[in-house]
Amino acid sequence: MPGFGHRYHSEDPRARKLLEIAQNCGCDGKLFKIAIEMEKLLLKDKGIKMNIDGANAAILSDMKFNWHLGCGIFAIGRIPGLLAHITEEILNEDPFRKITELKSTL
């Protein structure tokens, strides 16, 4: 189920923190509450909890963001980590994937 479960963790710590912050800021509307109830059912039946994408979707939907913007908004939070991985790869190891034809001057 998209928005629930995590490949490496039994609980996505980012989701827990984001849900807590949203609740403390009053961003826990109807869709937030539905997502929490879905999590309860999935935890009982499948042993999985909401992940960061599910938390983002529920909160942003309650804030009336257009769902078409979801992928772009989700990408914003991943960009710093991606840049860190690329920089580490360029500086410290043989490339894992072809990043560019240009040679780095770092």
Image (spheres, rainbow, N blue to C red):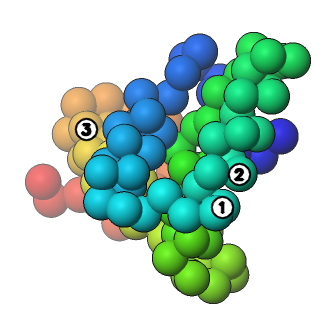
The answer to the question of whether label 1 and label 2 lie on touching residues, with beta carbons closer than 8 A, is: yes
What residue is drawn where x is 55% and y is 49%?
Answer: 55
Residue 51: quadrant of the picture = top right
Q: CA distance from mark 2 to mark 3?
A: 40 Å
Q: Nearer the viewer, mark 2 or mark 3?
A: 2
Residue at the disc numbered 1? 31
Amino acid under disc 2: Ile
Q: Secondary structure at mark 2?
A: helix
Across and down, in percent, residue 54 comes to 63, 49
Mark 3 closeness class: few <14, some 14–19, many ≥20 residues within 10 Å: few
Residue at the disc numbered 2? 34
Amino acid under disc 1: Leu
Across and down, in percent, residue 22 comes to 38, 55
Q: CA distance from mark 1 to mark 2?
A: 5 Å
Q: Which mark is residue 88?
A: 3
Q: CA distance from mark 3 to mark 1?
A: 39 Å
Q: Is residue 4 visible?
A: no
Q: Is residue 57 above or below residue 14?
A: below
Left or right? Give the position of 29 relative to 101. Answer: right
Where does the C terminus fall, quadrant-wise? bottom left
Front-lying residue, 31 or 100: 31
Q: Which residue is farthest right?
A: 45
Q: How many marks?
A: 3
